[in-house]
Image (spheres, coloured by chain):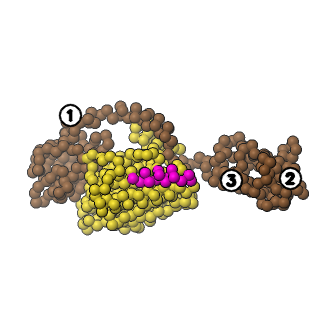
Amino acid sequence: MPKLVLKFENSILKEEVVGSKEVSIGRSPDNIIMIDNPAVSHYHARVFTEEGRLMLEDFGSLNGTFVNGQRVKMVTLKPGDSIAIGKHTIIVMESREDTGFATAGQAMKPAAPKIEETMMLDTKERREFLQKVAAVGESAQLAPERLKVATLVVRKGRTDRSEYVLTDKLTVVGKSAMATVKLKGWFTPKVAAQIHRREDNSYYIGAADKLPSVNGQPVLHPTKLESGDIIRIADIEVEFIYRD
Amino acid sequence: MKIDVGARSDAGRVRENNEDSFRVASGVSLFVLSDGMGGQASGEVASRLAVDAIVSHCREARSNPSSPLVGASIAGVSETTNRLASAIRAANRVVRAAAQRNEGHHGMGATAVAAWFTGERMSLAHVGDSRAYMLRGGLLEQLTKDHSFVAEQVRRGMMTPEEASASRMQNVLLRALGIDSEVDVDVDEELLTDGDTLLLCSDGLTHELPDAQIAAVLRDTSDAQEAATRLIDLANEAGGRDNVTVIVVRHVSKPVGVFARIGRWFKGPNGSSPKGGR
């Protein structure tokens, strides 16, 4: 956080940290930095933070406020600036416990992780991170399924084909026109089950209008399919197989 | 098919601005949500540009199906899904162009999650850490994976979920709209069944409420708008530390289907899917 150091000639009279509250400067005793000198107006100027920047505003004082020799009305301050009011000088410094001068506002301090603003990793950091995770991911993704072709082989029941190669992200099983695995028969539901392909080429079966079962277990939530699993949907039985 | 939609957005209890935006385009059954980022209120601009661009790209495709796709076509998914991914890529360009044109908007970006219903199918596409969940048969499943620094490390086994939830890097994204000239869009498809409830939400919801509580609200509130309002209220009661936006879409085709019945069996204390996200 920035700090204001009030000096007269070579002696330091006061140090004041600028936090969320503004620092008022003037001859009147209710100012935070009080300068008891007739050349200073009762309410002379103030220093405050706005959007992470440290600002100085002169309240239209008679004798003026000077920053680095220039008379100012409203300016942004930076560390090392020298503010002259009458014969007094106020030096702008960074206080040691916080290096983030440019982001001096309280809100910018890292607090609980949840409160922080969403941000993006910068391009270089992102590239480095993605290279790092790619190296880790290689070994994890060397599962043999990765390069194999998932196939449904019909073992029992009436369907339009005897085998289905699963290439789509979503495979629908049922009587519906959009079904890949077309079922026939009077009591067959339009959409009996759905099979999803996930990123690592694994397949999950989920229910639709009917509860399918895998190896005799009803599918109550998306279930991962393994080679050799027997899926029962309505009156048909299909085997899920990974092929080379 | 009938759908019941509820949506609401709130700045929360801490932030002054609401940088989230959403659009419910009921006419085309398209639902879009975006969480903006960037200083000096540019996050608001980014998320609004993003949702508008996505909706207008999809609407245009409806009236002119041969209009060109932005980016390459993805194999193994429907035309609608490809169109939705294209819309998000178009939004990336819009946000990026605005960020480059206006100095005050430099560095702004946004997440996007969008769902498009066509008949019994739902196409889903997303970039960033805004999520889509599906409540089906009483179980809540996260359909999207966050494109965030910590989520990626959890997926790769480099970090435990506990470490992730304590991490200071939770807010750091690996993908967002408006940052690079091209963006990778994740897509998915679902076949809708009776009673399916889709939830799109910004991270302001998921940082405040555990999945089990979200599941309980979606299960116990039949009216979609009531569910949306309830979720926002609970997020605010839990702290409301971030903007929070939710869109709840319930798919109803029959009065009582097999899933409504299964749903009732599952109305236990633990509503979250044991498998978690994917």
* First reached walking from the N terminus: tag 1 or tag 2: 2
Q: Residue at x 53, y 50 (%)?
A: B106
In front of the other: A54 or A169? A54
Q: Residues within 10 Å of mark 1 (few under 14, many from 20)?
A: few
Whether B136 is drawn above or below B27: the answer is: above
**Chain identifier of the brown chain:** A
Check the rendered structure and report the hue given to chain B.
yellow
Q: Position of residue A107 (x, y in %)?
A: 61, 52
Provide the major secondary structure of the magenta segment.
helix
Task: Specify the amino acid type for callout 2.
Answer: Gly
Residues tagged by mark 1 and mark 2 found on one chain of the structure: yes
Task: Specify the amino acid type for callout 1.
Answer: Asp
Q: Nearer the viewer, mark 3 or mark 1?
A: 3
Residues tagged by mark 3 and mark 1 found on one chain of the structure: yes
- Residue B252 lies left or right of residue B234; in this view the side is left
Residue A86's tag is: 2
Q: Quadrant of the N terminus of chain B?
A: bottom left
Q: Which residue is mark 1?
A: A244
- Residue B12 lies left or right of residue A56; in this view the side is left
User: Tag 3's secondary structure?
Assistant: strand
* First reached walking from the N terminus: tag 3 or tag 1: 3
For residue A118, say whether it is visible.
no
Q: Residue at x 47, y 39 (%)?
A: A126
Q: Position of residue A206 (x, y in %)?
A: 26, 51
- Residue B125 lies left or right of residue B49; in this view the side is left
**Quick check: is B107 in the magenta stretch?**
no
- In magenta, the rendered stretch is B90-104
Q: Which residue is mark 3?
A: A49
User: Tag 1's secondary structure?
Assistant: loop
Real-space Cα distance between discs 3 and 2? 24 Å
Residue A91's tag is: none
Q: Chain of mark 1?
A: A
